[in-house]
Amino acid sequence: MHKKVVVYPIFTSVFIFCIPSGECENLLASRTIDRLSITMSAKLKKQIKAYLVEAPMSLGEIAEKMELEEKKTFKLLRSLFQKDEIKMTRREDGVRCYTSKV
């Protein structure tokens, strides 16, 4: 089995990895997927903020409207909340409701 040497500059340090040649493509594919997921998350957050400008919505309503799992929607909402881009209130029935801070 041949090995390839892969060099990744990270900040001011350079890390050198020796990996089997067949795994090189897998490594590059996983890095591409990571970049895509970051881009997708940013787009989803923008979409959530656009929905919340229109009207306050609960976690379940946002997940249903965006056709996402509630777990993924919760992570996106948590990120927006921590960055102070949305606020949370409670409805009369006790359900958490999110609104945009525009």
Image: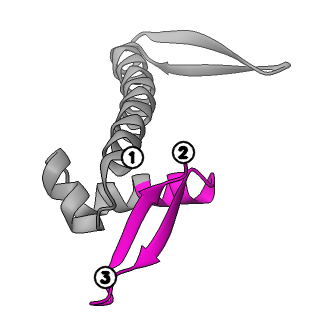
Q: How far apart are marks 1 and 2 (CA)?
A: 7 Å
Q: What's the residue at 36%, 39% (across, down)?
A: 50
* Residue 91 to residue 72: above or below: below
Residue on which the image places disc 2: 102
Q: Say which of 93 and 62 sits in front.
A: 93
Task: Decide if residue 63 is on the left or right side of residue 101.
Answer: left
Residue on which the image places disc 1: 53
Residue 92 on the magenta span = yes
Residue 60 in picture, x, y percent from top left: 21, 66
Residue 59 in picture, x, y percent from top left: 29, 66
Residue 24 in picture, x, y percent from top left: 41, 16
Q: Report the disc number at residue 95.
A: 3
Residue 11 on the magenta span = no
| Secondary structure of the residue carrying numbered label 2 | loop
Q: What's the residue type where badge 3 is placed?
A: Val
- Whichever of labels 1 and 2 marks the residue nearer the N terminus, that label is 1
Circle 1 crowding by C-alpha within 10 Å: few under 14, some 14–19, many from 20: some
Q: What stretch is highlighted in magenta?
A: 77-102
Q: Can residue 15 be seen in this view?
A: yes
Q: What's the residue type where badge 2 is placed?
A: Val
Q: What's the residue at 43%, 59% (across, down)?
A: 99
Label 2 near label 1: C-beta < 8 Å?
yes
